Image (cartoon, helix red, strand yellow):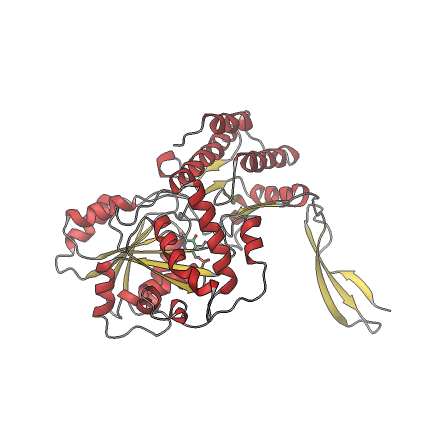
């Protein structure tokens, strides 16, 4: 007869998951299983900073048989889809779509404008700019990272000074992350353009809006951004799988000046297709296109200004609660200055290991999943268990945010994590008053 044994070390009563092995009569392991010990009934809530909560309407739109990719509705949908994407980015220029995640969009963007040996400047304010810079290094660029740490925005005066030094204009591109999802800082991309202009620097301004797209105000054309990358699984509310690169005519000229770009990453046919298959360099991401169509309909029905405003209000509620909690105990918001905080994600600290205990408790008891801390401490380091993040991006509203905050408060009470009073009342007030930061 088959036997089942638990293979976890003894103890650890708070554990949410448990690992089992199935043994055959000879004692050999024939299968293994991980089980969730406590499955909270009711609707679960994934409050991590992407993938975000997917609207039923998006999922339902994707739930269909395979459509024809050679004629009919799907090919016919593409021009309007591209137009409506550009409306979210606030650009009248070009967009290329890739089957891939944010990393794919990073590589696509770099591949179209950077050649091996080119200098690239990366003002970094957390994990993601460094990751984009590493990718540029792997593509042969000479990458200079200006690291502003994990709890501050870019210091634009320092960036201006560095660009002013570059009299020969060797720097070909500046990579700026609008919202760094690890630190939850929001950088001033329009300000970055202003410092580039103030020293007449011709480098391309390339922005990562993967966390901020359709959450925080972003105006590609008005802010003078040459290339912008994003992906579908956060503010766009679509399951992961699509990356987008927006580019203007300056960037297109830089692309044309390159001797070659790989067939797959080349943005030209994707942005200016003669045939439907060129949008995707092959088979279309059929179901994602339907999901994205619905998501864009939802965004434009609400209105992008109102989408940004809703995120600002809900972020204000999250901050109000966190600020109240932080009046006692160890909870701290990573970014102190409200004007530098993202409207999509909030990075927080507690005394280690309370962040992990809290995440486990709300997951097991409430069906609420909070984000792990990212890039703040190495996973093997005890400090890692002191960081966590709240995602408040995309398909979220006031009652969800009140539920998220109520869940965190319940968890802190249950675990006797010391915290200040009045958080939920402060959050409710922020929602009632509307407005933002
Ligand atoms: C700001 C930012 N840039 C890049 C990425 C990488 O995107 P992906 O994980 O989809 O490859 C992420 C992912 O969370 C991100 O938040």
Q: Is residue 343 above or below residue 138?
A: above
Assign the C terminus to one quadrant of the image. Answer: top left
Given residues 308 and 336, the one toward you in this image is 308
Left or right: where does residue 227 sit relative to residue 210?
left
Given residues 383 and 159, the one toward you in this image is 159
Assign the N terminus to one quadrant of the image. Answer: bottom right
From the top left corner, tell me how far across and down residue 424 is, in percent.
55, 28
From the top left corner, tell me how far across and down residue 26 is, in percent.
83, 74
Q: Residue 272's image quarter?
A: bottom left
Is residue 1 visible in the rendered structure shown here? yes
From the top left corner, tell me how far across and down residue 366 is, in percent.
66, 41
Q: Is residue 244 above or below residue 264?
A: above
Number of numbered discs visible in the structure rendering:
0
Left or right: where does residue 101 sit relative to residue 268?
right
Q: Residue 340's image quarter?
A: top left
Residue situated furthest right in the rendering: 1
Given residues 355 and 340, the one toward you in this image is 340
Is residue 233 visible in the rendered structure shown here? no
Q: Quadrant of ligand 1?
A: bottom left
Residue situated furthest front in the rendering: 72
Question: Residue at horizontal 35%, vertical 49%?
Answer: 87
Question: Residue at horizontal 83%, vertical 68%?
Answer: 2
Residue situated furthest left in the rendering: 167
From the top left corner, tell me how far across and down residue 312 is, in percent.
42, 36
């Amino acid at each position: 007869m088959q036997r089942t044994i638990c293979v976890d070390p003894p103890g650890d009563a708070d554990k949410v998951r448990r690992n089992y092995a199935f043994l055959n009569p000879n004692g050999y392991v024939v299968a293994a299983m991980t089980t969730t010990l406590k499955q909270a009934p009711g609707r679960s809530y994934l409050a991590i900073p992407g993938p975000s909560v997917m609207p039923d309407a998006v999922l339902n739109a994707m739930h269909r048989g395979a459509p024809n990719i050679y004629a009919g509705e799907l090919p016919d949908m593409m021009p309007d889809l591209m137009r409506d994407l550009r409306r979210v980015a606030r650009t009248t220029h070009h967009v290329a779509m890739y089957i891939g995640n944010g990393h794919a969009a990073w590589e696509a963007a770099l591949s179209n404008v950077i050649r091996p040996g080119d200098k690239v400047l990366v003002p970094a304010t957390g994990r993601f700019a460094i990751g984009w810079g590493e990718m540029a290094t792997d593509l042969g660029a000479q990458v200079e990272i200006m690291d502003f740490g994990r709890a501050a925005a870019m210091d634009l005066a320092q960036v201006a000074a560095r660009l002013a030094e570059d009299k020969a204009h060797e720097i070909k591109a500046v990579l700026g992350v609008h919202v760094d999802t690890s630190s939850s800082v929001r950088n001033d991309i329009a300000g970055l353009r202003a410092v580039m202009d103030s020293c007449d620097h011709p480098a391309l301004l390339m922005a990562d809006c993967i966390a901020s797209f359709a959450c925080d105000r972003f105006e590609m054309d008005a802010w003078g951004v040459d290339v912008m990358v994003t992906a579908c699984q956060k503010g766009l509310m679509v399951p992961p799988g699509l990356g987008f690169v927006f580019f203007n005519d300056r960037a297109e000229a830089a692309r044309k000046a390159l001797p070659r770009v790989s067939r797959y990453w080349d943005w030209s046919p994707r942005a200016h297709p003669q045939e439907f298959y060129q949008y995707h360099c092959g088979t279309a991401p059929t179901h994602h296109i339907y999901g994205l169509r619905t998501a864009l309909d939802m965004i434009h029905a609400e209105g992008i200004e109102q989408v940004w405003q809703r995120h600002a209000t809900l972020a204000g509620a999250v901050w109000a609660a966190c600020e109240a909690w932080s009046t006692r105990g160890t909870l701290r918001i990573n970014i102190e200055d409200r004007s530098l905080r993202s409207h999509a994600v909030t990075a927080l600290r507690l005394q280690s290991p309370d962040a992990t205990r809290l995440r486990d408790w709300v997951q097991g008891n409430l069906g609420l999943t909070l984000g792990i801390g990212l890039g703040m401490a190495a996973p093997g380091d005890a400090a890692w268990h002191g960081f966590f993040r709240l995602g408040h991006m995309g398909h979220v509203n006031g009652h969800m945010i009140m539920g998220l905050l109520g869940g965190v408060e319940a968890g802190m009470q249950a675990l006797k994590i010391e915290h200040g009073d009045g958080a939920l009342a402060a959050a409710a007030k922020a929602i009632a008053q509307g407005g933002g930061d």
